Amino acid sequence: MSSLGQNFGMEPLITKPLAVISDARIGSRTDKTSVTERLLSISGEDQLTVDRKHREHWTGRLPTRFMIYTNELPALNDESSSLVGRFLLFLFPNSFYGKEKHDLTDELLAESSGILLWGLVGYQRLMQRGYFIQPEASKEAVEELEMLGSPIKAFVRDRCDVGSGLEIDKDVIFDAWKSWCAENGAHIGSKTWFGRNLLTAMPGVRRGRRGSSRNDPKHMYVGVALRGDQPGRNAQCEIIEDFDSGVDQSGN
């Protein structure tokens, strides 16, 4: 997995329809942002320029799909959850630790014809339907994968309500975010970083302000509030495009 974040990590994928990562691990040295970016680009069939050792760059679309085996859910930087939405997650909850079958290969070979027929039936069903289905049993794990990729979403799930008519001062919610990070070991970052990721993770949330820009207005987030707060309606809260520039949606 970490090789995807390296300079020549995509070179082996040229012309390959399938890449198997047999025991995926995301370590502290893994460039999570680069790995996420490349997985998004490849799965989105974007035009890519691939670095190759001692050869000129290759440009084109990689036909590759990834099959990833892992004992732990990967924590990739994905505030918008775009990548998580492209995963099909299959859980194998049974552990054979201490119950290993040393003659498993012989058992599987004896059942090979049945396994082949089973696979063909599944292939026919897939061709008739035209797409894969996310298993119901995986929904909780998909949500957990989403939270791992977006701590902001985990914070909103734990501490906030989202919906029309809600609003909160940006300093108040940032203080709550800092408290949540201290409890959960997450990176706090700057107030600007938090705001960007909040709007990315929660598309229905908007920036707003109360009062005139000349009279020290309150900068707000509209569409979200801390759980248990009693926020007022946002009828008097002006939606703006950017806090710092003071430009609203009308361009004034």
Image: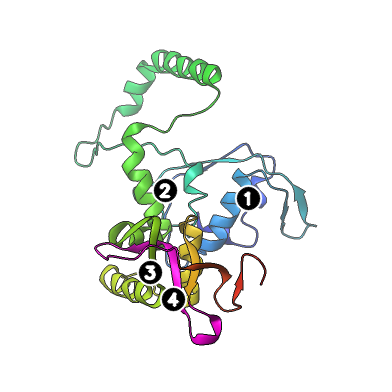
Disc 2: which residue: 23
**Range of residues picked out in magenta:** 211-235
Disc 4: which residue: 189
1 or 4: tag closer to the N-terminus = 1
3 or 4: tag closer to the N-terminus = 3
- Residue 168's label in the rendered image is 3
> Depth check: 13 or 141 in front?
141
Residue type, label 4:
Gly
* Dot in front, 4 or 2: 4
Whether residue 111 is visible, yes or no, is yes
Give the Cα separation between the discs numbered 1 and 2. 22 Å
- The answer to which quarter of the image holds residue 18 is top right
**At numbered mark 4, what does the secondary structure look like: helix, strand or loop?**
loop
Above or below residue 115? Residue 209 is below
* Dot in front, 1 or 4: 4
- Residue 41's label in the rendered image is 1
Give the Cα separation between the discs numbered 1 and 4. 26 Å
Do tag 3 and tag 4 residues touch (Cβ < 8 Å)? Answer: no
Above or below residue 248? Residue 190 is below
